[in-house]
Image (spheres, rainbow, N blue to C red):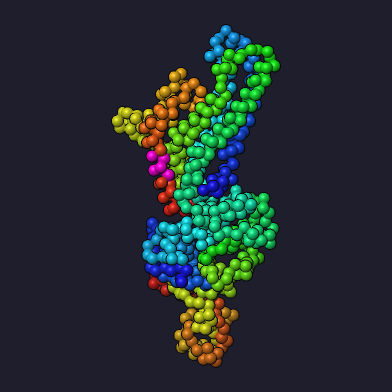
């Protein structure tokens, strides 16, 4: 299993290059912004510390969002190519000549978007945020602006904890059925997996709309994509994509939401079908 | 024990029957050449043997069913499908690391030794290597596995003559011993003639001829007839007749060599000659029937 995952990292270098590039970009942008932090805090002086903390947190959220957005795209495109690329370049004949089962291969590939990328994103993001934190602190210390009250409301470790929870929970588990679906399509489609992945759901939604004048299917997909209880529970209505420390769902609510478990069951079904397909399919 | 045992092996694709009841028995320690024209079912048969496709009929490789036990079987069976199946992004060093990681019978030192004889650098990726080097790399990886059965499907297709010769030399000298079994499918018959212990001809999904090379030498004879003896030679019922340099060349099975020697020059036919005689005459028959 370990080597199967490693081989994926050798093949798709974008798995780690893209998040690191996004992190470097956002670290630089946030650091530039942090240089003007004292000014903004001075302007916000009349506000109470609870509101001031928003000014401090802003760049952290944006940095996190940028990196997560990039890795989410990487995860989607990786999944879509997972079992298609090896058939396209005929290398499946090499991989299948080795004592590695189809189950191991599919699980290794599924672990990339569901586990490896979230953990990697967490690592990269927290390092970026630590850098931004140091730059902010240094900028403030040099300016003589006193904002201890606001800093008291800001907890770096709490923020990182919520980030990890969000990444594993939402990006790993909650979005798992999307990745599972893409991996299944990549095992099945002969050409253009991106069309096979997107057109049937759209067609199904349209069919429902025209035939029954309802759009439950589209709403279902949309709601799941939005992040389910993470969104419905957020006090300020922030998007689930944000890992704002103040607006996350309670773990108990997340773990008991049927959307999560139905999604995971669907994921298992999609992956089981992908294993079967990989066994039968040869090069294209 | 037989390494490979097939009885009534059938495979049907949407519109064609690729294997039409193939019986095959390969004992341990043999090097069997599976020879047939394009589309005869060679690749389909090999794919069934290494567990890549489902089939009807009975098939056991090392006593196991390849379709349901592929991953276990592949610990003891190696397979080179084609010259170009190594993924292009793979680095040579990664290939060795990976094989060592996933294959319990892979010997890293052996692979390094084979590679040291080539000009392949460890840091190169497959796409930077020439076609011949990719074949060398694949062979080095496979020969470093202590496998019982090696299956090769057109392993030298598209390589130049030097690489082809090297490939089979390495296979014979550095790899083969009496405890391994090698199954090689090709239509470049003349090149593997000296390598094989057995030949099987396959045509349109059926085994049409099989014998060992020893048997081939003792049973079959090719007679270049002296012009005055042509009718006498024809009376002995040759399997096949063709012209070479204006003289008739007749191929006999189970004929008395001394009797033949009186009529012209006798020699042992090449596998290629035999192939043309057996499969070519079948093709002629059906063409005749169609007309």
Relative to A76, A56 lies left or right: right
- Residue shown at 55% from the left, 77% from the top: B270
Residue B290 relative to residue B101: left or right? left
Observer-nearest of A124 and A256: A256
* A186 vs B142: above or below: above
Vertical relation: A269 (above or below) B269 = above
Where residue B243 sits in the image (x, y, percent)? 54, 79
Would residue A67 be found to the left or right of residue A224 on screen?
right
Q: Is residue A38 magenta?
A: no
The reply to whether residue B251 is visible in this rendering is: no
Residue nearest the viewer, comparing B84 with A76: A76
| Percent position of residue B19, x then y | 41, 65
Q: Give coordinates of residue A100: x percent, y percent.
A: 50, 53
| Image coords of residue B204 (percent x, y) | 43, 67
Q: Nearer the viewer, residue A261 or B48?
A: A261
Number of residue marks: 0
Residue B288 visible in the snapshot:
yes
Instruction: Give me the residue at 49% from left, 21% from top.
Output: A246
Nearer to me, A110 or A129: A129
Q: Residue at x 58, y 13 (%)?
A: A149
Q: Tell me the quadrant of the picture where the C terminus of chain B can be found.
A: bottom left
Q: Compared with residue A38, is residue A273 higher up or lower down, i.e. above or below?
A: below
Position of residue A208 in the picture relative to residue B220 (left or right): left
Q: Which residues are magenta?
A: A265-271
Residue at the outermost left position: A212
Question: Most prominent secondary structure in the magenta stretch?
Answer: helix
Residue, x 50% and y 56% (percent of image)?
A99
Occupied quadrant, residue B166: bottom right
């Amino acid at each position: 299993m370990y080597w199967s995952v490693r081989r994926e990292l050798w093949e798709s270098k974008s798995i780690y290059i893209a998040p690191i590039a996004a992190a470097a970009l956002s670290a630089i942008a946030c650091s530039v912004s942090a240089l003007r932090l004292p000014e903004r805090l001075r302007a916000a002086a009349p506000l109470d510390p609870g509101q001031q903390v928003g000014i401090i947190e802003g760049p952290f959220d944006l940095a996190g969002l940028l990196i997560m957005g990039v890795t989410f795209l990487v995860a989607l495109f990786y999944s879509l190519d997972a079992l298609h690329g090896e058939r396209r370049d005929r290398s499946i004949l090499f991989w299948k000549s080795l004592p590695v089962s189809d189950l191991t291969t599919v699980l290794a590939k599924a672990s990339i978007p569901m586990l490896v990328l979230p953990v990697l994103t967490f690592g990269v993001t927290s390092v970026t945020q630590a850098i931004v934190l140091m730059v902010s602190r240094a900028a403030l210390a040099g300016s003589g602006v006193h904002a201890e009250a606001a800093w008291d409301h800001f907890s770096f470790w709490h923020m990182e904890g919520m980030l990890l929870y969000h990444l594993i929970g939402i990006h790993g588990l909650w979005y798992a059925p999307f990745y599972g679906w893409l991996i299944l399509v990549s095992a099945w489609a002969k050409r253009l997996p991106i069309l096979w992945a997107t057109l049937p759901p759209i067609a199904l939604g349209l069919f429902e709309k025209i035939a029954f004048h309802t759009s439950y299917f589209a709403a279902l997909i949309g709601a799941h994509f939005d992040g389910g209880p993470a969104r419905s529970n957020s006090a300020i209505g922030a998007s689930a994509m944000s890992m704002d420390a103040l607006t996350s769902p309670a773990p108990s609510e997340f773990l008991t939401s049927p959307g999560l478990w139905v999604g995971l069951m669907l994921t298992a079904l999609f992956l089981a079908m992908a294993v079967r397909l990989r066994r039968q399919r040869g090069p294209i | 024990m037989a390494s490979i045992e097939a009885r009534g092996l059938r495979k049907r694709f949407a519109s064609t029957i690729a294997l039409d009841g193939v019986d095959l028995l390969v004992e341990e320690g043999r090097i069997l050449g599976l020879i047939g024209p394009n589309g005869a079912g060679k690749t389909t048969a090999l794919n069934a043997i290494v567990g890549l496709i489902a089939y009807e009929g009975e098939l056991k490789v090392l006593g196991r069913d390849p379709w349901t036990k592929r991953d276990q079987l592949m610990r003891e069976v190696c397979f080179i499908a084609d010259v170009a199946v190594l993924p292009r992004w793979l680095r040579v060093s990664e290939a060795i690391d990976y094989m060592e990681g996933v294959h319990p019978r892979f010997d890293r030192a052996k692979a390094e030794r084979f590679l040291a004889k080539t000009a392949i650098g460890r840091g190169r990726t497959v796409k930077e290597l020439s076609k011949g080097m990719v074949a060398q790399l694949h062979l080095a990886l496979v020969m470093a596995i202590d496998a019982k059965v090696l299956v090769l499907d057109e392993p030298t297709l598209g390589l130049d003559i030097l690489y082809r010769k090297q490939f089979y030399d390495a296979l014979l000298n550095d790899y083969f011993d009496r405890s391994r079994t090698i199954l090689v499918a090709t239509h470049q018959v003349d090149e593997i003639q000296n390598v094989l212990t057995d030949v099987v001809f396959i045509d349109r999904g059926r085994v049409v001829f099989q014998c060992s090379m020893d048997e081939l030498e003792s049973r079959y004879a090719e007679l270049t007839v002296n012009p005055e003896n042509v009718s006498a030679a024809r009376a002995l019922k040759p399997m096949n007749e063709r012209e070479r340099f204006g003289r008739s060349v007749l191929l006999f099975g189970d004929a008395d060599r001394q009797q033949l020697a009186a009529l012209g020059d006798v020699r042992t036919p090449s596998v290629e000659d035999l192939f043309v005689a057996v499969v070519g005459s079948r093709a002629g028959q059906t063409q005749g029937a169609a007309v």
